[in-house]
Image (cartoon, rainbow, N blue to C red):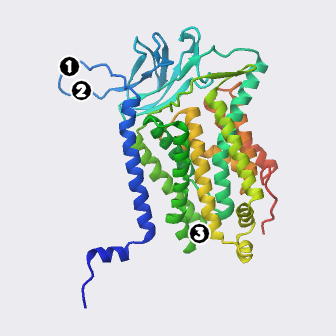
């Protein structure tokens, strides 16, 4: 009898899912390591003021950034930083840099003072001039306020109403891409995936890396969607299919998704840090539609969302695999008895959900900027959209997302922007009190 080599023993004992998981983590580390170097060239960190004295120096926390218009630095522009009883205004110098030293770690808001911008220059998104900043994991956080040619938005109440409606429609469309992924996964597996927000963040971060490296934005989008689809495939292959085979209950699987969410989120924080970064696609033009001034990027984002949603609708209603997906969603046991490969359908759903959510992350990153917890921040809105439209209904998720997006933006006319997400949840509660199954859900008798 011979002795097997250690290599042979390892190859026999190491499960295939573990190999896939190790490969995914190694790839993620490699990609995110590139990201650490990219921002150093893409952004310039404001230099904090030197502390007086020698010896031990107290840690200094600084919030700052650079404000430019068409690559030209803007001088004399003010940014107000507030939080935890602290308030101070930073002013850009000749190089366009501004910096404010804050007293310590915590949550702050940085607000661009639009009236200090030079004539003929306005924010690219006039309704997004406030940034939420959390400082503590790093000493310095950069905040960017993209600007371009234009004028500050003003007009009558009806003009404001129409503007908010358009912004809400844009927000709702990009929410819909991610919400449909949640709905398809729930419909076919019964799993509420709490790591879905991190799939959105993955798409935004990967696209940011590609653009920071100077890649063509279109190529970056295609590769990001492909990698996001691969992430969805890997999640099902490594985690959820083995759990299904072992008959693990939905509550236990739910806990697994929560744990996966935490792991991925803090991996992003470790590699990406806690700052907010804006994706530079080179598109700085604004488009005026009646009283609405909207960035060309947002307009393209809306067009992409509509095309993708139409493609999903065609896939679900006209293709063979789409019809099989709907059959599995309606009754998985009956679908299996009819000859449908349920595991294959579920795998396709995970891939499709990953691709759609990754694309949603790209569009949301263009819309709000990229942060390590951006997906987690809107996860509740995504679940609200799915629940409002009807659990397990892809078209219901679309309707629910549009309602949520429009309501959140319209509400800012009368309430502070920080409370708009709360309004969406109040609307959700109100709808469910009168129609528990959601807008497009089906009534079911329990018991």
Mark found first going from the N terminus, 1 or 3: 1
The residue at which mark 1 appears reads as 53
- Residues packed near mark 3 inside 10 Å, few (<14), some (14 to 19) or many (20 plus): few
The answer to whether 355 is drawn above or below residue 158 in the figure is: below
Residue at 76% over, 15% down? 156
Q: CA distance from mark 2 to mark 3?
A: 54 Å
Which circle's residue, 2 or 3, is located before the other in the chain? 2
Residue 245 at what x, y percent from top left?
Answer: 56, 74
Q: Looking at the picture, does residue 350 appear above or below residue 164?
A: below
Q: Quadrant of the N terminus?
A: bottom left
Q: Which of the numbered marks, if any, corresponds to residue 309?
A: none
User: What is the distance, in whole Å, between disc 2 and disc 1 at their CAs?
Assistant: 8 Å
For disc 2, the neighbor class at 10 Å (few under 14, some 14 to 19, many from 20) is few
Is any atom of residue 270 visible in this view?
Answer: no
For the image, the number of numbered tags is 3
Q: Position of residue 294 (x, y in %)?
A: 66, 25
Q: Which residue is mark 3?
A: 249
- Callout 2 touching callout 1 (CB < 8 Å): yes
Q: Is 356 left, or right, of 264 in this rendering?
A: right
Residue 443: x %, y % from top left = 82, 59
Element on which disc 3 rests: loop
- Give the left or right position of residue 162, taking residue 354 as reference: right
Which residue occupies 72% across, 24% down? 163
Q: Which mark is residue 57?
A: 2
- Which residue is found at the position 47% from the left and 47% from the top? 265
Whether tag 1 and tag 3 are in contact, CB under 8 A, the answer is no
Please give the name of the residue rendered at 43% of the width and 14% of the height, measured from the top-left corner: 92
Q: Residue furthest bottom?
A: 1
Q: Is residue 393 left or right of residue 241?
A: right
CA separation in Å, label 1 and label 3:
61 Å
* Residue 297 place in picture, x, y as percent: 61, 30
Residue 284 horizontal side relative to residue 384, left or right: left
């Amino acid at each position: 009898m011979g002795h097997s080599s250690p290599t042979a023993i390892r190859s026999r004992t190491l499960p295939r899912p573990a190999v896939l998981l190790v490969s995914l983590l190694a790839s993620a580390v490699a990609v995110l390591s590139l990201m650490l170097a990219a921002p150093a060239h893409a952004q310039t960190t404001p230099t904090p003021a030197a502390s007086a004295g020698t010896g031990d120096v107290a840690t200094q926390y600084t919030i700052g950034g650079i404000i430019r218009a068409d690559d030209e630095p803007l001088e004399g522009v003010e940014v107000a930083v507030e939080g935890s009883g602290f308030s101070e205004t930073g002013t850009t110098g000749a190089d366009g840099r501004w910096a404010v030293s804050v007293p310590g770690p915590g949550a702050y808001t940085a607000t661009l003072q639009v009236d200090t911008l030079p004539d003929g220059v306005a924010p690219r998104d006039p309704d997004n001039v406030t940034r939420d900043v959390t400082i503590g994991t790093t000493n310095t956080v950069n905040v960017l306020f993209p600007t371009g040619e234009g004028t500050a938005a003003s007009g009558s109440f009806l003009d404001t109403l129409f503007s908010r409606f358009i912004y809400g429609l844009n927000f709702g469309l990009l929410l819909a891409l991610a919400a449909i992924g949640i709905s398809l996964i729930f419909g076919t597996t019964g799993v509420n995936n709490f790591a879905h927000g991190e799939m959105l963040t993955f798409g935004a971060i990967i696209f940011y890396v590609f653009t920071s490296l100077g890649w063509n934005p279109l190529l970056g989008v295609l590769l990001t969607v492909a990698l996001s689809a691969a992430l969805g495939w890997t999640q099902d292959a490594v985690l959820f299919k083995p759990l299904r085979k072992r008959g693990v209950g939905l509550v236990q699987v739910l806990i697994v998704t929560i744990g996966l969410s935490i792991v991925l989120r803090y991996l992003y924080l470790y590699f990406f840090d806690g700052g907010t970064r804006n994706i530079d696609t080179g598109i700085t033009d604004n488009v005026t539609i009646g009283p609405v001034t909207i960035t060309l990027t947002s307009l393209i984002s809306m067009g992409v969302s509509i095309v993708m949603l139409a493609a999903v609708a065609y896939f679900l209603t006209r293709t063979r695999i789409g019809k099989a997906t709907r059959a599995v969603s309606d009754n998985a046991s009956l679908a299996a008895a009819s000859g449908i490969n349920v595991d294959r359908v579920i795998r396709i759903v995970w891939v499709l959900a990953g691709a759609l959510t990754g694309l949603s992350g790209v569009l949301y990153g263009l819309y709000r900027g990229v942060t390590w917890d951006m997906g987690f921040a809107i996860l509740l809105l995504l679940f609200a959209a799915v629940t409002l439209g009807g659990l397990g209904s892809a078209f219901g998720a679309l309707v629910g997302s549009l309602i949520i997006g429009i309501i959140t933006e319209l509400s800012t006319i009368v309430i502070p922007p920080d409370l708009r997400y709360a309004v969406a949840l109040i609307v959700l509660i109100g709808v469910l009190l009168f129609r528990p199954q959601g807008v497009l859900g089906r009534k079911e008798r329990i018991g």
